Image (spheres, helix red, strand yellow):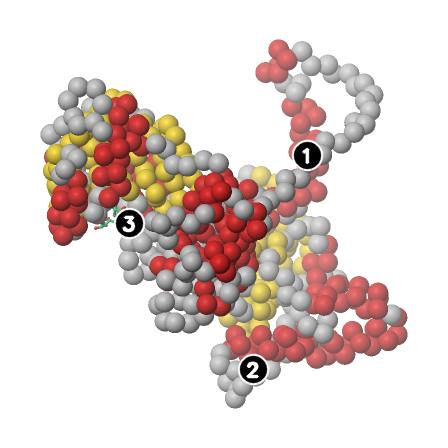
Amino acid sequence: MSFRLRSAVRRAICGLFGEEAAARAAALYRRAAVAPQPEPEPLWPDSEHASPAAAFRAYVDERIDEDADSRAADEFFLTEADGSFASADGSVAWAAAAYRGAPYTGLALRAGASVSTPLLTIGNDTTLVCEIAMGAIDVALQVPGVTRDIGRVEVPSLVTVDLSALNGLTGWISMRARTDAVILKWIVARSDRVGLLHGRSNYARRLATESQFFTGVYDHEIYRSRGQSEDAAPFDAPRGGFRPDAERLPDGDAVGALPAADVRSDDNAYVYGVRLLEALVGRSEPDFASRLAALHANGPVRLLSLCSGVAGIERQIIERAGVPAEITLYDINPTLMGRAAATLSPFARVFGVIGDVNEIDPQRFDHPYDVVMCVSGLHHVVELERVLSAAADLLVPGGEFWVVGEQIGRSGNRLWPEVRDAANSAFRALPAELRRNSIDGVTDAALREMDYSSTTFEGIRSEEIEALLSRYFEPVEVYRRNCFLWRTLEPSYFANYDLNVPAHRAAIHGLVAAEYATWRTGGRPTETWAAYRARQSAR
Ligand SMILES: C[S@@+](CC[C@H](N)C(=O)[O-])C[C@H]1O[C@@H](n2cnc3c(N)ncnc32)[C@H](O)[C@@H]1O
């Protein structure tokens, strides 16, 4: 049924049976899954639209938006609860299926039958997950006039497909059975929502099984020592509820009223924003200078700094600690190494290794270190396992590995999908002059979705850093922050800000309030400052 025909049918139902019946019919139609393929209609090229995606968007806006029920969703999961998938002719039906030794219920399709999702808009992080218990299925995105093949799923396989290449397209994702087939899992959602939606699929059946299972579980002798009764007794519902007071999160005005909001002479937009954020969070990074002083016993404390660059942070720490120190710098860039040596030499004895840290070999060092540290360098490292293992090996017993100002966000220095909306609504609230991107002078409507690792090592494995740290180290002190603030004040926007302009300060207050609210409500931080001890030292 084409969109046009569908709208006509809706209008007819509406005229004959009223709005409610029409809405019900529209909802049923949306969920009716047996091949609601739209009639092919040439959409592009035409004179008006620059791309098939733009043409399709216009098509959808024109025809679908008149019908609020039919607006595209952004996620889908297959669930028995949606009984409408079964077809009258039996070519599509829910059926019990045994798979890998366990009983399942799946959507069985006769060869040639097809089913499709409701209308979906594919986003930059949309992922398709599909598992089948039998047969082979062709998966495609159907938009009017165009079928985009996504791939084939054959038993036994659990397939995960990154749909970001279809970003912006709206259509139906269809599954067509090449042979008789049974679909167990079918999720189309933002990648971080897949686990949740998997849990929601076939929820009622899982819940019944769960309840049934646990009724008998506690009869097992392993639980006998708990002294549980096998009898049942009556119980009352709780009289009162537990309602925690809702926390009032600060807005931009409240941030501007903080004592920390007074601009200092050495502030810039980034330093100012982060200082305000710390004031709100009520915490700051570990005091590395005090930690260094505490590690000093006999002779100079020995530090090894990986990816040391100009070693400005190292200098500050050693100077503040005020203890005799020797530092070995390890960087691939001899120019930066020379500058670092000049900066550090008044405070410490300086040694240097010019080389690729990805090839570090602990055997080539003739003594261990009290501190191995890395300032904003791990997110450039490819061989994280080798480098972290070497760092652990190179520590004296009781020595510390410091991870200072490290990017631990999504690889490629991208935003985590779940904070993107919050980040963009804070960004869009900025005056246009603060959204001008110095890369090309364009005023951005949203933060750019760049993968900075596509041509460099920027954030090459940043999302793996924390998990790998825990393989080699135990945390001693960890401070994590900054879900998205840094992206709004990064070098491409930084020069737009003048802290003497009240509107610019107010804009930063608003960004900090939004960042804080995101963090308070569960947003994932992207930066860490932390001290660790090795889980096992080779020395
Ligand atoms: C983001 S900078 C951090 C520099 C310094 N720690 C700081 O905070 O200013 C990354 C540094 O890592 C160095 N680097 C990048 N890849 C490297 C590699 N494979 N081996 C050694 N050094 C590397 C660069 O030369 C640069 O100095």
Tag on residue 43? 2
Above or below: residue 388 compared with residue 462: above
Q: Label 3: state its secondary structure.
A: helix
- 407 vs 6, left or right, is left
Residue drawn at 63 percent across, 42 percent down: 248
Whether disc 3's CB lies below 8 Å from ligand 1 is answered: yes
Above or below: residue 491 compared with residue 222: below
Q: Position of residue 106 (x, y in %)?
A: 63, 50
Quadrant where the N terminus sits is bottom right
Q: Position of residue 189 (x, y in %)?
A: 56, 55
Front one among 271 and 505: 505
How many other residues sit within 10 Å of disc 2, few (<14), some (14-19) or many (≥20)?
some
Inter-mark Cα distance, 3 to 1: 43 Å
Q: Nearer the viewer, mark 3 or mark 2?
A: 3
Q: Position of residue 121 (x, y in %)?
A: 58, 65
What residue sits right under mark 1 in the picture? Answer: 244
Q: Label 1: state its secondary structure.
A: loop
Tag on residue 380? 3
Quadrant where the C terminus sits is top left
